[in-house]
Image (cartoon, grey):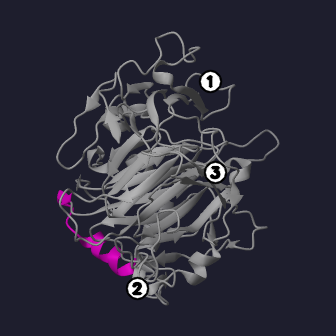
Amino acid sequence: MAFQQFPTWPETAADSEDPYRYQVGFGNHHSTEAIPGALPPHGTNLPQKSRYGLYAELLNGTSFMSTKSTAANVWMYRGKPAAARHPPSQVEEILHLESCFLPTNSNVAFTPLPYTWGPLKSNESSNSATNRRVTFVQGLRTMGGHGDATLKEGLAVHQYEFNMNMEREAFVNHDGELLVVPQQGTLNVKTELGSLLVKPGSIVVLPAGIRFSVEIFRPAGDQWSEIKASGYALEVFGTRYALPDLGVLGANGLAHDRDFEYPVARFDLDPDEDTSSFCVTVKLAGRLFSYTQPHTPFDVVAWHGKYAPYRYDLSRFCHLTANTDQLDPTSYCVLTAPSKWPAASLVDFCVFGDKWAVSRNTLRIPYYHRNIATELCGVIHGQYKGSVRPLEAGGLSFEQSYMPHGETYEAYTQASEAANDPTKLEGSLFFMLNVSSHLALTRWAMEQHPDIRLERPGIWASVQNHFVHHLKHADASWSDATDQHIPTPPKSPNGRV
């Protein structure tokens, strides 16, 4: 049984395709109650006796000594505290999850080779959905990462595929904040602070320490469609996602604060607590533990704070355009995660959707370049337009930091001669992760992934050296320059120039 009430902050309305309401505003201090009066009166977070017999519980997402701008926590008023549980034990099931990407971990390796992977096709994997039923947690596969969760610095990149809902079970990630990108299947994400519906083309961010469950959403009356979902997940350790600074852009552009949506309070009641049990799985340092409790963890009747999950519709992103040259990938940055290095991000989550290409007399395809950033690219829908990687919707590509890359010679030649008329780019949506460091790949990604696509042999053999055909013209230009009067530099008193 669930109840829901208007929150005290502005909200979006529910509709026929989404049964939930949301509060809006990135990083706001939100306040919501499912039953009027469940929140304590203003001026106190911890009354001696909470109304309706609720327990007050605080979750801190940042250290006690934090700046005002970075501190984040949430006060919850719930049926039973989270401490009311049985002792946890380690999960014996072996899942392909990693949180340590140091060279000492034999399950990961650093490589300069580029990789492309296809989607997690269930009919090609021994751990696939056709062979067994798996939940969101069981369907996670770590592809690579950087750093170590225990050092509170780094990240992990995952693909996921699952075909079973989490029923009477929840998951809580102690290692870091999780950004989930659905590619196939609409997710019904139930959290302690309320529920969010996340369609392909949207993202959801789940803070560390928040318990949640994931189901595949089915519209009312739909009982026959296949239950299956797949996508991507980006996990950051020791930091949280933030909006990038706009700098010279001023007040507008990229992702707007008001388009980020947070859940309103919504709680469940167990019909018989004494006989029913709920299983909670904990991820800590890449290992899984679980405990049971005789009550639902989704019993928060009211809450207020800044530490909460949220969703964002990528179609609302405000793309920038350039009339000369190209914009860097960070011009398409939706969210960034700061690192411990001053003025440097850990990772930037960038999105490329419908936009106009209007630049004139410039090369519009990605130019040949080398970056400190490791680049990973995933396709949510549509056709990938790159010429080097055989990338498709649900797949993922990898290019290690400092490794040179760009488009094929054929694509370069065609783009060099193409008319630069204004062009509407539409029909596809993909994202790029710019990681400001080397990235280690897991052994599973390099050896056991069901669809590994290495770089095609000889792909760069056709590249021509055009300069050798212009040596006569270059010699003539040099002769013309040397024939011109060039002033002699003045000499010093000791006769040296």
Q: Secondary structure at mark 3?
A: loop
Name the residue tied to disc 3. Answer: 175
Quarter containing the N terminus: top left
Residue sitting nearer the eye, 7 or 98: 7
Q: Please rate how many residues cluster around mark 3, counting C-alpha atoms within 10 Å: few if below 14, some from 14 to 19, many from 20.
A: many
Task: Judge left or right: residue 4 versus residue 402.
Answer: left
Distance of label 2 from label 1 (alpha carbons): 50 Å
**Residue displayed at 39% across by 18% down:** 37
**Residue displayed at 59% across by 83% down:** 447
Q: Secondary structure at mark 2?
A: helix
Give the number of the disc on residue 67.
1
Q: Amino acid at mark 2?
A: Asn
Relative to 466, residue 67 above or below:
above
For this orientation, the residue located farthest to the right is: 494
Q: Which residues are magenta?
A: 408-425
Q: Amino acid at mark 3?
A: Asp
Q: Amino acid at mark 1?
A: Thr
Q: Is residue 187 visible?
A: yes
Give the number of the disc on residue 123.
2
Residue 355 lies in the magenta stretch: no
Q: Secondary structure at mark 1?
A: loop
Give the number of the disc on residue 432.
none
Q: Please rate how many residues cluster around mark 1, counting C-alpha atoms within 10 Å: few if below 14, some from 14 to 19, many from 20.
A: few
